[in-house]
Image: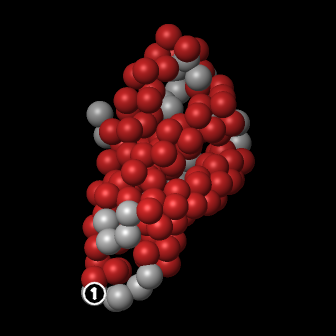
């Protein structure tokens, strides 16, 4: 698949995921006001599961391996999940306590800050090409191409 098309698909899933995350956060924050970090973490976990399914079937369908589904989910959580969780929560704390932004505005800023890192990790590790798809070029043509994480 063309790397720019895959990048576009990744971002489309990300935009839908952002809507899922913000809607989840708004609901959680309404029912548990004052616990914005816990609500942010729960909304992020829902979004991670949502995005994983969409990435598996839409962004990287050529790299789907039914036998390795649990491994892909684990790698996705360890990579995109950790970047999103740590980056999102750190930025939420900073933007809310220091910049005094409302919870949804702070979260709306925090989400795209982790996007490029998440694409690189997804493309090179979480949904890495399998041995049967190595012959076709799948790498993002810029800095992600040479990223060797594990």
Drawn side of residue 16 relative to residue 42, left or right? right
Relative height, residue 5 to residue 29 (above, below):
above
Drawn side of residue 12 relative to residue 129, left or right? right
Dividing the picture into quadrants, the one containing residue 53 is top right
Which residue: 31% across, 66% down?
35
Q: Which of these two is toward me, 117 or 101?
A: 101
Dividing the picture into quadrants, the one containing residue 3 is top right
Which residue: 38% across, 70% down?
33
Drawn side of residue 98 relative to residue 54, left or right? left
Going by the picture, which residue comes out furthest to the top? Answer: 67
Relative height, residue 73 to residue 91 (above, below):
above
Q: Position of residue 91 (x, y in %)?
A: 33, 71
Q: Position of residue 139 (x, y in %)?
A: 55, 40
Residue that badge 1 annotates: 98
Q: In the rendered view of the protein, which quadrant contains the C terminus? A: top left
Drawn side of residue 24 relative to residue 126, left or right? right
Q: Secondary structure at mark 1?
A: loop
Q: Which of these two is toward me, 76 or 47?
A: 47
Dividing the picture into quadrants, the one containing residue 37 is bottom left
Q: In the rendered view of the protein, which quadrant contains the N terminus? A: top right
Q: Which of these two is toward me, 24 or 90?
A: 24
Q: Position of residue 73 (x, y in %)?
A: 44, 29
Q: Is residue 83 visible?
A: no
């Amino acid at each position: 698949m063309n790397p720019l098309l895959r990048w576009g698909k990744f971002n489309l899933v990300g935009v839908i995921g952002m809507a899922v995350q913000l809607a989840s956060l708004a609901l959680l924050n309404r029912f548990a006001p004052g616990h914005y970090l816990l609500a942010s973490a729960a909304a992020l976990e829902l979004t991670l599961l949502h995005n994983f399914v969409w990435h598996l079937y839409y962004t990287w369908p050529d790299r789907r391996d039914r036998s390795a589904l649990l491994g892909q989910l684990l790698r996705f959580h360890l990579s995109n999940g950790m970047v999103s969780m740590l980056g999102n929560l750190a930025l939420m704390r900073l933007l809310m306590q220091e910049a005094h932004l409302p919870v949804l505005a702070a979260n709306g800023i925090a989400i795209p800050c982790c996007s490029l890192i998440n694409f690189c990790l997804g493309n090179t590790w979480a949904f890495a090409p399998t041995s049967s798809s190595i012959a076709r070029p799948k790498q993002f043509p810029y800095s992600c191409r040479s990223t060797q994480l594990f």
